[in-house]
Image (cartoon, rainbow, N blue to C red):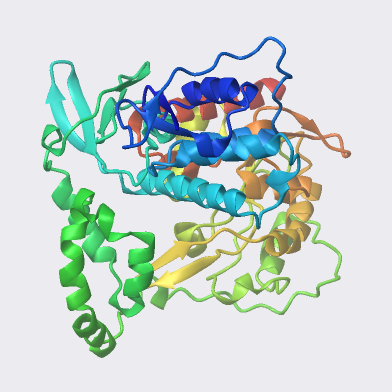
Amino acid sequence: MRTVSLTSETDLTGWREAARGLLSAGVEPQAVRFRVGGQEGLFDLPSPTPPVSDKARPITVPRAFLDLAAEVALHRSDDRFDLLYRMLWRLQSERDLMKVASDRDVADAMERAKNVSRASHKMKAFVRFRQVEDDTGERWIAWFEPAHRVLEKTAPFFQRRFTTMRWTILTPDGTADWDGAALSFGPPATRDMAPQDDEIEEFWKTYYASTFNPARLKTKTMQGEMPKRYWANLPEASLIPELVARAEVREREMVAAPASLPNPKLIHAVAPVVERAVQDAQPPETLEALDRAVQGCRRCPLWRDATQGVCGRGPTRADLMIVGEQPGDQEDLAGEPFVGPAGQVLNAAMAEAEVDRSHAFVTNAVKHFKHEPRGKRRIHQTPNTSEVQACRWWLDAERAIVKPKLIVTLGATAAYGVLGRKVAVTKERGRPVALEDGSTVLLTVHPSYLLRIPDKAAAAAERARFVEDLNAARALM
């Protein structure tokens, strides 16, 4: 029995070189074993790998096998490289082996690859960083024990996700370190090398406990998504036993609790009484008539939960029209577009770009506030395709009255309302689009997007891009 020694647990390159030599020498799978370092069996005889013969025919395998081998090599099973060599041997005579999903070797390899992929996914979900201070400032360190050797496979995800942070992930297989400029890998680590807690952890536990819903508890499902093997790495896991134990009591308390009081702001908010709009009537010819008519709109169900329809505001004739998504909570109550937090961001950015809002017509693609009542709050919901299409009648009517030369759309919903097609704002952003009526459309993001960016540096950069888009709009006018 030949024994081929590989340099590391994930030495796929060494396995490929050895397998090529063994295959050219005609060494059958049952006569060779692949081991890492000095891991030799009782009957294994260490032997050099046969060199590849100059007369040996080229070894070709399907791309699917190479991709599968890259995953299987990360599995913790001792015979993973033996399995891959057996499949490689068979592929020389069974060219369609990879298409036979019911084959024992193929099914085994695919199952191991699936386990590796699952381990990578769990690592993305369950790594918890803790903050420390070193000689160069703030650093975030995490300890994690992956089910398989997926550190190098998964580390680039954290590099993309936390580009502005300096972080280190410690595992029993190795370490990954991102210094803000380069990703590097180091030797295995132990749990005691990682911090045990930090000051942010208590806030996270409080948040986790407050979002736990005992009425929807399914213990087996939870453990299926969050296996117990990872609980030791999760600070919130210390709360789970008590939360589960008290779930039944908390559920009874929730049922017995009185309903929350309605939002006092909404008690006196009554939609104006108007006659129902005729769906096929001619569009109003003035903004005042349009504003009255939209109150009777029944083109989609959104009117049922909204306080009132909110049309645009601005000059009857304006070179610039700005189109957002829909009125928000404050806009729904006030009957005016962009008077809430997103409106404040828009006003500040327009002022910085020297675009006078009083000279622009500001409106939304959808005229009624779509939301979900939640206690005293009304949570915004994105309008769906049919709702946007139904409301285009009103937006087209506004465009016909105002006759803008340039339309700036804020977000994907606004772009869809104007262009009548779905767009990827990130791809078409800042690129003028000519319309058949002679006007031009310029796409950019919605101001509410800027409010949702947690990282201050990233938020500042995106706001600067937003101002640049408004500068481009001013140049086009």
Q: Is residue 325 visible?
A: no
The foreground one among 109 and 286 is 109
Residue 449 x, y percent position in the rendering: 48, 42
Residue 214 x, y percent position in the rendering: 28, 76
Residue at position x 22%, y 64% in the image: 209
The foreground one among 461 and 220 is 220
Quarter of the figure with the C terminus:
top right
Residue at position x 34%, y 67% in the image: 222
Quarter residue 292 falls in: bottom right
Quarter of the figure with the N terminus:
top left
Judge whether 304 appears above or below 294 on screen: below
Residue at position x 87%, y 39% in the image: 437
Number of numbered discs present? 0
Which residue is most to the top? 54
Residue at position x 47%, y 21% in the image: 14
Q: Is residue 296 visible?
A: yes
Which residue is most to the right? 436
Quarter residue 276 falls in: bottom right
Judge whether 46 appears above or below 403 on screen: above
Residue 260 x, y percent position in the rendering: 30, 80
Judge whether 274 appears above or below 57 on screen: below
Residue 106 x, y percent position in the rendering: 61, 49
Residue 386 is left or right of residue 26, and the answer is right
